[in-house]
């Protein structure tokens, strides 16, 4: 019995390991050109803030109905109630809904007398749950997910490039353990010695004295660990030595630390994909309309001022013209009087 229990536990761990391993493989496929963009869009949509909020609201509503059903079905196991509620609300399973009290003849749950009517509370809760949760909440989640997916799909190219660059940087920088150039003792002594020890442990007849004292299982385990250490040393040596044979670099920057430079725009934000939404267009339209209204008001004010100035100039011109007419008339009258007097004197 103990062996069977251990075997079942091992199979359960293996199943979990396979599930997580395949999930990790699917997540790594997001870096492939083509299908990776679709995987990345689905992944980013699921973990977006809007979807997480809706899933939280959905969980709260489900827990609310679950607690209510547990209080009414006191004789039932909570696990059974949870499974029946899950099947009924998420998949519309008729048998599960009947078990929760939605059947026609089910009177095994608590009822409340309201006047002449006997009300089955499980049936009321089942009707409320299927109407609110299944019809409204689930369809709302689907609609919001579709909307978020469409928005993220438009920026899939930018997200794909950002994630590929991040993975490349993580892979390169994760194995650069040395602060300076690779020492010769690491690549010429430690690495060959590690490989020789691993090969000796893998052989059926080890030649080293301490290897003969170990059991076969211990030899294989130690050899596997030594091969892993050798692999890490090779990665450190190769990645640390990239660019060390550049003669120009050695002549100009010898002894200085090297860096991996990543350039971007000065206004770039890793969490902002510069997405243009309808709200942005609405705000832009409102700003443009506001600017146009202010310009119309300024032009109207300028027109009133110009009109007032023109009226003032016309009034001044009119007064000047009237003054000139009066002066001309006065001169004509005075000239006529002098002529008349001169003719009279001559006569």
Image (spheres, helix red, strand yellow):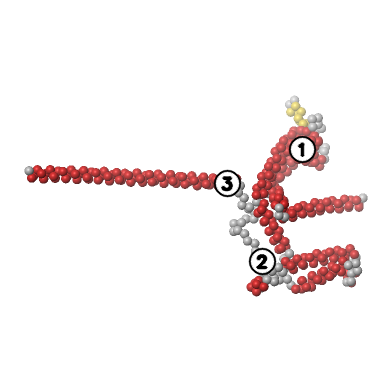
What number of labels is visible? Answer: 3
The answer to whether residue 166 is above or below residue 92 is below
As drawn, the residue found furthest toward the front would be 34
Q: In terms of sequence position, does the residue under pointer 3 or pointer 1 come before the other?
A: 1
Give how far across and how far down residue 275 sits, in percent: 62, 50
- Residue where numbered disc 3 is placed: 281
Closer to us: 102 or 297: 297
The answer to whether residue 154 is above or below residue 101 is below
Left or right of 186 on screen, residue 259: left
Q: In terms of sequence position, does the residue under pointer 2 or pointer 1 come before the other?
A: 1
Alpha-carbon distance for marks 2 and 1? 58 Å
Closer to us: 327 or 127: 327
Give how far across and how far down residue 8 sits, in percent: 87, 50
User: Which numbered marker is on residue 120?
Assistant: none
Asked whether disc 2 touches disc 3, contact meaning CB atoms under 8 Å apart, the reply is: no
Asked whether disc 2 touches disc 1, contact meaning CB atoms under 8 Å apart, the reply is: no
Q: Is residue 231 visible?
A: yes
Residue displayed at 84% across by 69% down = 197
**SS label for mark 3:** helix
Considering the image in quadrants, where does the C terminus appear? top left
As drawn, the residue found furthest toward the top would be 116
The answer to whether residue 99 is above or below residue 6 is above
Residue 267: image quadrant is bottom right
User: Which numbered marker is on residue 92?
Assistant: 1
Residue displayed at 69% across by 56% down = 163
User: Which numbered marker is on residue 259?
Assistant: 2
Q: Is residue 66 visible?
A: no
Q: Residues within 10 Å of mark 3 (few under 14, many from 20)?
A: few
Residue displayed at 41% across by 46% down = 302
């Amino acid at each position: 019995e103990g062996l069977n229990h251990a075997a079942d536990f091992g199979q359960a761990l293996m199943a979990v390991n396979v599930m997580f391993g395949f999930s990790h493989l699917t997540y790594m496929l997001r870096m492939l050109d083509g299908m990776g963009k679709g995987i990345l869009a689905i992944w980013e949509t699921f973990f977006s803030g809007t979807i997480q909020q809706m899933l939280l609201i959905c969980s709260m509503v489900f827990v609310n109905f679950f607690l209510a059903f547990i209080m009414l079905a006191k004789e039932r196991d909570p696990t059974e109630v949870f499974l029946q509620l899950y099947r009924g609300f998420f998949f519309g399973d008729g048998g599960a809904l009947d078990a929760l009290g939605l059947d026609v003849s089910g009177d095994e749950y608590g009822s409340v007398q309201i006047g002449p009517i006997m009300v089955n509370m499980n049936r009321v809760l089942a009707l409320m749950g299927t109407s609110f949760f299944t019809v409204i909440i689930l369809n709302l989640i689907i609609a919001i997910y579709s909307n978020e997916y469409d928005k993220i799909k438009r920026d899939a190219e930018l997200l794909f490039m950002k994630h590929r660059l991040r993975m490349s940087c993580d892979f390169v920088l994760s194995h650069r353990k040395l602060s300076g150039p690779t020492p010769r003792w690491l690549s010429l002594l430690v690495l060959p010695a590690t490989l020789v020890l691993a090969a000796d442990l893998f052989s059926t007849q080890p030649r080293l004295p301490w290897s003969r004292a170990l059991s076969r299982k211990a030899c294989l385990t130690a050899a596997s660990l030594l091969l892993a250490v050798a692999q890490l040393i090779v990665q450190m040596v190769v990645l640390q030595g990239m660019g060390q044979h550049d003669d120009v670099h050695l002549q100009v920057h010898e002894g200085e630390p090297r860096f991996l430079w990543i350039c971007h725009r000065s206004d770039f934000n890793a969490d902002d994909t510069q997405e243009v939404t309808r709200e942005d267009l609405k705000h832009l339209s409102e700003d443009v309309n506001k600017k146009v209204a202010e310009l119309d008001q300024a032009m109207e004010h300028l027109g009133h001022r110009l009109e007032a100035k023109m009226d003032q100039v016309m009034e001044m011109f009119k007064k000047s013209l009237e003054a000139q007419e009066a002066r001309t008339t006065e001169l004509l009258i005075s000239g006529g009087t002098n002529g008349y007097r001169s003719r009279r004197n001559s006569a």
